[in-house]
Amino acid sequence: MFSKSKAIPLRGSASALCNNLALNRIPEKNLTTHAVVHRSAVNLVTVAGAVTGEGQQNFHHRQVTCREAGQHTGSMVLQAKWCQLATRNLLVITSQKGVQIFEQDGAIMVFWHALGAAESVSGYSTFARGVAPVAGNLICVGTSSGNVLCFNIPPKGPNVTLAETMKGHSCAITDITSTGESGDTVVTADDGGNIIVWKGPKFVEVTRISGSRNPAPCICLWNNTVIAAYSTGHIRLFSAETGNIHAEVCAHARWISALDILLESGLLISASEDSFARIWQLKKGDTTEIEHVHSECVTDIQLCGAKFTSAEGKAFAVTGYDTNEIIYYVQN
């Protein structure tokens, strides 16, 4: 169904982090930029033309280093993700020191938020992880304390403010998803496998899904259904309104490291440390159903990122730990 296509080279290998692949599409310029974290830097690779990995393509590389002003050494980056808001598109980088927000090309830093005492937990390292845009002008970022920082983003300029701190988790945030710029629903997950659904504009907890102490490193939201991937290799589907489970799949043999979903078609891709990328079809009925569509083994590579690269699900890309390329697969 899919065959391996041309790989896109990276200036540095991918770190062993979940969700370690982000895409930013600029349709008016026919450009797509990929972001992959390597230690204290984010490698950006921009490709012109159709993003299928096929044909002769030119690559433009840029490296964004996460460091405080006056510091010569960078801090460990945990995630890089673009956030499409109502009036601007920003690159958000989370690290052990805090949160950095850049213009979408990574050239200009717009805002820097250092993690303070409120985000530190005795005996544990401090970091930010989990990013999602919401309501057109807000960006939510998770922290190691379990708090979720909600930043108000102006239409232009650097006057970013901390609008709200959402408190409900007792351990580190792993991932955040939302209804995007058009909605005000946010879903957060933590290291204990607990999931909370929040409703804005003043975010209040509306649904809590208790975990079983197994981290939920990746979550998605589709048609009022929360899709959660776990360190045990399971994928579970929950109602965002009631928290009731709709379906459970033993999807992988090891830790699931990435999820991505196409909202229109309901196609879901999962990637795991077991070297497999799998595609699933979600179907909405009285409950949400899930059906396996395709499996692809990326031999001897511990996968850490996966994204659909076409809106129709005809191509996808994956990254792997200690691998200095983005591997493309295209539908036959």
Image: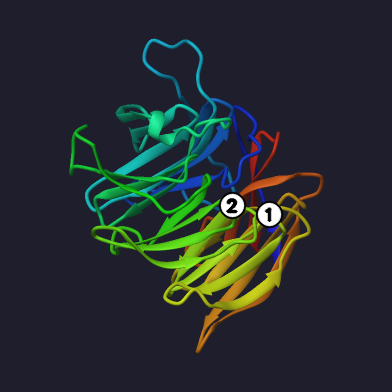
The residue lying furthest to the front in this view is: 122
Q: Position of residue 110 (x, y in %)?
A: 28, 30
Could you tell me which residue is drawn at 44 percent across and 57 percent down? 177
Residue 314 visible at all = no
- The x and y percentages for residue 145 are 47, 41
**Image spot of residue 211 (x, y percent):** 59, 61
- Check the image and report above or below for 97 versus 167: above
Q: Nearer the viewer, residue 214 or 97?
A: 214
Q: Residues within 10 Å of mark 1 (few under 14, many from 20)?
A: many
Identity, as a three-letter code, of the amino acid under mark 1:
Ser
Q: Is residue 95 positioned above or below 132 on the image?
A: above
Displayed quadrant of residue 149? top left
Query: Which mark identifies residue 231?
Result: 1
Image quadrant in which you'd find residue 259: bottom right
For the C terminus, give its image quadrant: bottom right
Please state which of residues 25 and 90 is positioned toward the viewer in this rendering: 90
Give the residue at mark 2: 217
Query: What kind of element bears circle 2?
Result: loop
| SS assignment at label 1 | loop
Seen in the image, is 294 located left or right of residue 10? right
Find the distance from the CA under tag 1 to the CA under tag 2: 7 Å
